Image (spheres, rainbow, N blue to C red):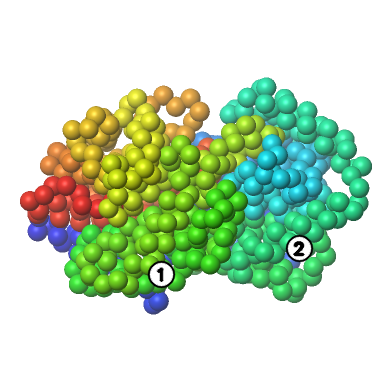
Amino acid sequence: MAALETHIRKATDALLSYQQPDGHWVFELEADATIPSEYVLLVHHLGETPDLEVERKIGVYLRRIQGEHGGWPLFQDGDFDISASVKAYFALKMIGDDPEAPHMRRAREAILAHGGGSKVNVFTRIQLALYGVVPWNAVPVMPPEVIFLPRWAPFTIWKVSYWARTTIVPLLVLQTLKPKARNPRGVTIDELFLEPPATVGPPSKAPHQSWWWFLLFRGIDGVLRAIDPLMPRGPRRRAIEAALAFVRERLNGEDGLGAIYPPMANSVMMFDVLGFPPDYPERAVARRSIEKLLVVGDEEAYCQPCVSPVWDTALTCHALLEAGGEEAVEKARKGLDWLKPLQVLDLEGDWAHARPGVRPGGWAFQYANAHYPDLDDTAVVVLAMDRARGAAGDGRYDVPIDRGREWVLGLQSKNGGWAAFDADNTYTYLNNIPFSDHGALLDPPTEDVAARCVSMLAQLGETPETSPAMARGVAYLRETQLPDGSWYGRWGLNYIYGTWSVLCGLNAAGLGRDDPAVSKAADWLIRIQNVDGGWGEDGTSYKLDYKGYEPAPSTASQTAWALLALMAAGEVDHPAVERGVAYLARTQNQEGLWDEERYTATGFPRVFYLRYHGYRKFFPLWAMARYRNLKRSNDRRVAFGM
């Protein structure tokens, strides 16, 4: 135990060193080659004078992450992805790489071997259409008048997820006015196509789509394409004005539209095509928001999809409160004090369309994104504040906790679960429209977010016996358990993440190891432990024909989730837990943290994955500290919701 204490102290000191002067933590958030490639192409679309040093460093980054298969994967060591590969090749050629250089030749051969540029997804097709590489006929029609469709219509912007809505609205303008990238260097990528790019037609059916629905929507797409040139100018002008007004209301200062890269970039291009000059205030602030996503190092640079300060700060506070000690607790409280004023209390965001009358009270993921707070961040912040309140005995967090709880209760979906940003966003037929070949158009309730909300309510004193919301939440979690005992993880990789989330929630709700759902989940986690004592899982677990867990190399964060899950299930004394803690102790680096190159988080399953640079810093500390605390205690039960 003395050796374990040394590991915990070293990790705590290292984590504290990353705290910002104002009290918060924020770590890099890395995706795949797509976002940095799109950043390069955006600069040249706008005809800006590029920062050649930043371009050079992005080139270094893109070359380093090229896969052995010649293309670019969606996560480390992942399979070839045609869309990421086409964008990365295009960006590198734009930067100035010789198409006959070995890495470019390998990429081109891999792209052609996988069917060429016509096989890319819809969002990549839009990028290529903006550059005139493929015709706009290769892109599904999305007339701007859809912005006027009421909520009861089969398709409306209010029936899709927040990320789709904020991406689509400025795209309505781009797809209507069809600007062409300035492309001062005149770069083309015709060599990536097996056919003349000008002949590329509409996208094919995606694997997740039903033929019946797809053919229906393809027919509607054909009708819209035929009548689009005939649309009256007056309504079209008003539709474009409505799209502009939507963006302006949600522009969000230098944090950007939706505070995520795709809508931020689309908003800049929208202002551009509408004739607003670069120094126009709204366009200028939208453009600056993108620059704030850049991570520029000594040799490499990349563009983040967004930033994660609220998530990073809240989870770091949990780890520090678990680690304990006067300094760690004091610094955690400083972090929670930083979070307090970021709660959205005075703005009814887009979520209110589904839940009118619910008072605001959530936290967003980013520094500012008031229209789009999320349930996951809100629950995690409230859990941390409640734990700190219990330790300190003061009331500084009472109001934030009460408002957060009220908002979470108000956003529960009809099936008892909770989604990330909206309630009852379950219009599954919409994932069959041609625009949704990525299958991520919606924000339905998911097991991991629902579990976090159950954890929060339980820690605040609600039980299934006294709270209908808790009873429905626990029932939802029981219903979604898979036959092998695991739960799906929507926002983290994957079944390890989901199972950790749910076991924490069930424990908080009073379910112990004697409950069949808990024991089955614990047995599954013990069964999939790697021989090195750790746990691991990668993005292939999201495949449509998933048949059960497939081994992957151990990571520090996934090992921590499995340990926290097993301890929540009452297994603190199981040999598997001891082996997992030993794995973390053995792999701790000189800084006191852990090395983790593999991606362990999810943006959109099968489409977009994330590597949180903070996960390797706070989750292992959290797990080791909890193990120490429980082993020292006479009560082996985890007393907190996370």
**Residue 401 lies in what quarter of the image?**
bottom left
Q: Amino acid at mark 1?
A: Lys
Q: Is residue 494 left or right of residue 260?
A: left
Near-viewer residue (73 or 459) = 459
Q: Residue at x 64, y 50 (%)?
A: 165
User: Is 71 drawn above or below residue 359 in the view shown?
Assistant: above
**Residue farthest to the left?**
634
Would you name the residue on which mark 1 appears?
340
| Left/right of residue 488 with respect to residue 159 in the rendered view | left
> Is residue 622 at all visible to an observer of this figure?
yes
* Residue that numbered label 2 is attached to: 271
Please identify the quadrant where the N terminus is shown: bottom left
Frontmost residue, 277 versus 329: 329
Between 110 and 247, the residue placed more toward the observer is 247
Is residue 473 placed above or below 621 in the rendered structure?
above
Between residue 256 and residue 576, name the one nearer to us. Answer: 256
Image location (x, y in percent) of residue 467: 33, 45
Give the number of marks.
Answer: 2
Amino acid marked by disc 2: Phe
**Nearest to N terminus: mark 2 or mark 1:** 2
- How many residues crowd around disc 2 within 10 Å: few (fewer than 14), some, or many (20 or more)? many
Q: What's the CA distance linking mark 2 and mark 1?
A: 34 Å
- The image quarter in which residue 316 lies: bottom left
Mark in front: 2 vs 1: 1
